[in-house]
Amino acid sequence: MSRLALAALATLLIATSAVAADDAAWTALVSGGHVALVRHGNAPPGYGGDPPGFKVDDCATQRNMDERGRAQARAVGEAFRQHGVRVDKILSSPWCRCLETARLMAVGPVENTLAVAASDRSPERLVVLKQMVAGWRGPGTLVVVTHALTVQALVGIMPDQAETVVVRPKAGNEPGIDVVGRIPVPK
């Protein structure tokens, strides 16, 4: 088999695997009892985070979403509706880019909590977030709108802006969560 044919086959297998993971993620969300970890929409970089001296309660001091990010947030919400995902609860980081993403998704009332802005730099909040996610039983979906570093600290995945990582709490009384799949940014 030629190198070109092998490369084409490898690309097809990767694409097929990605579609299967997307399908598994959507199926899990539709069935309920799962958690959707949604990274906020596009917020242009410039500081590797927020500007020096930012304030969580003052959007003018933060790194915020641009029009592309707002469109992504609306598209994520539309994808949830098109797939028939029942959202029982939406938690958002108090950072403005996360709150705006959650509100623009328009899948239900948004609660903000500092617990979903956890990372390796905030171990106490990370423990609380892990307990919240691992304890979710539905019946519908818990949506957590947060930051890349939060998702990475929680499940080891660094999502793209507006990407969704779907997890399921472990069955029974066993603590923890398992990754079901990833849903890329809707086009």
Image (spheres, rainbow, N blue to C red):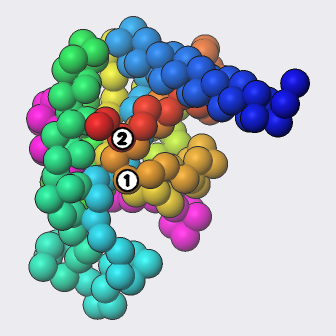
Q: Quick one: SS at disc 1? A: loop
Instruction: Choose top left, top right, bottom left or bottom right for residue 4.
Output: top right
Residue situated in front as seen by the camera: 119 or 163: 163
- Graded by Cα atoms within 10 Å as few (under 14), some (14 to 19) or many (20 or more), the crowding at tag 2 reads some
Instruction: Choose top left, top right, bottom left or bottom right for residue 100.
Output: bottom left
Coordinates of residue 106 in the picture (x, y in percent): 12, 35
Coordinates of residue 39 in the picture (x, y in percent): 37, 49
Residue situated in front as seen by the camera: 82 or 38: 82
In this rendering, the answer to whether 87 lies above or below 159 is above
In this rendering, the answer to whether 121 lies above or below 130 is below
Instruction: Choose top left, top right, bottom left or bottom right for residue 74.
Output: top left
Residue situated in front as seen by the camera: 117 or 23: 23
- Graded by Cα atoms within 10 Å as few (under 14), some (14 to 19) or many (20 or more), the crowding at tag 1 reads some
Residue picked out by circle 2: 185
Residue contact at pointers 1 and 2, CB within 8 angstroms: yes
Coordinates of residue 181 in the picture (x, y in percent): 54, 28
Query: Residue shown at 13%/44% (left/top)?
Result: 104
Query: Residue shown at 55%/70% (left/top)?
Result: 121
| Residue 115 included in the magenta stretch of the image | yes
Residue picked out by circle 1: 161
Q: Amino acid at mark 1?
A: Gln
The quadrant of the picture occupied by the C terminus is top left
